[in-house]
Each structure stands twice: as C-alpha cells, then as structure tokens.
C-alpha cells in the first residue's frame, strides 16, 4: 500500500510541476508579446527613439526569460528568437520600416508558437 501511495504522490507532483511550468511559460510569453506589440506601434508611428527604448526593454525581459526557458524549451526555438531580435535591432537602428515590421511580426509569432507548443493539449501529448 505504501508503494502505491508513493507512486500517486509522484504522479501528482509531476502533473503539478507540468501545469506550473506551462502557466509560467504562458505568462512570460504574453509579456514578451505585449512588448513586441509596443515596438510595433512605435515603428508604425515612426517614433524610432521610442522603438529603440521598447526594444531595449524587450531585450532585457528576454534575457531574464531566456535563462529559465532554456531548461524547458527546445534550444532551436530560443536561438530563433535571439536571431530575430538581433535582426530587429539592426532594422530599427537603420529605421527600416518594412523590415522592422516584418521582424516584429516574426518575433510575436515565435513567442506565441512556444506557448502553443507547451500547452497541455491532446495534439502536443500525442
């Protein structure tokens, strides 16, 4: 009987850890997406100094998020976001509206994709 209880406790802890991880990733991806939306709004309004400030804030947020995401997320996904952020940095620096808008959209999609792939859905489980 003791063994069965330990198995159930272990299973329960595993499920709770999975749910907690999903919620943390979902929350942080929402925060990142909102930062990218702010950058997008600044670019649309041609406020390049504001876009640079927003980008710096997003990069700082990403630096904190990336350190613990790397434990749970495929490193290729993290590398894609790093590369896209570097591209966006140069596009904002050179004030390239079209390229900046495209890269911000890419970043939003990458972050939302991570939240989607970590969701406990039947598709992700199977």
Image: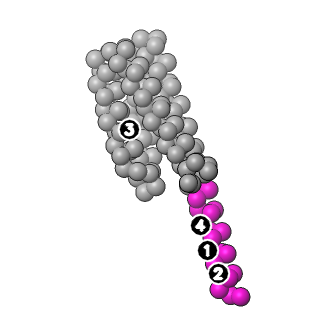
The residue carrying mark 1 is 10
The reply to whether dot 1 and dot 4 touch (C-beta < 8 Å) is yes
Residue 56 located within the stretch drawn in magenta? no
Kindly report the distance in space between the C-alpha atoms of the residues bearing marks 1 and 4: 6 Å
CA distance separating discs 1 and 2: 6 Å
- Residues shaded magenta: 1-19
How packed mark 3 is, by other alpha carbons closer than 10 Å (few <14, some 14-19, many 20 or more), is many
Q: Position of residue 14 (x, y in %)?
A: 59, 66
The disc at residue 6 is 2
* Dot 1 and dot 2 residues touching (CB under 8 Å): yes
Residue wearing tag 3? 81
Secondary structure at numbered mark 4: helix
- Residue 75 in picture, x, y percent from top left: 37, 50
Give the residue furthest to the front: 126
Name the residue at 62% across, 56% down: 19
Judged left or right of residue 87, residue 101 is right
> How far is disc 2 from disc 4 in space, using C-alphas?
12 Å
Point out which mark residue 14 bears. 4
State which quarter of the image contains the C terminus. bottom right
- In the image, 44 versus 54, the foreground residue is 44
In whole angstroms, how far apart are the C-alphas of marks 3 and 1? 34 Å
Q: Are marks 3 and 1 in contact (CB under 8 Å)?
A: no
Quarter in which the N terminus is drawn: bottom right
Residue 7, above or below 74 = below
Question: Disc 4 or 3, which lies upstream in sequence?
Answer: 4
């Amino acid at each position: 009987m003791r063994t069965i209880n330990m198995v159930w406790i272990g299973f329960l802890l595993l499920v709770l850890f999975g749910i907690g991880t999903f919620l943390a990733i979902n929350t942080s991806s929402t925060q990142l997406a909102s930062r990218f939306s702010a950058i997008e709004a600044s670019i649309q309004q041609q406020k390049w100094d504001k876009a640079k400030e927003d980008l710096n804030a997003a990069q700082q947020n990403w630096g904190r998020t990336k350190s613990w995401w790397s434990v749970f997320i495929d490193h290729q996904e993290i590398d894609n976001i790093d590369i896209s952020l570097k591209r966006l940095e140069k596009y904002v620096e050179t004030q390239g509206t079209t390229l900046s808008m495209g890269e911000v959209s890419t970043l939003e999609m990458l972050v939302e994709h991570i939240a989607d792939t970590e969701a406990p859905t039947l598709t992700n489980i199977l």
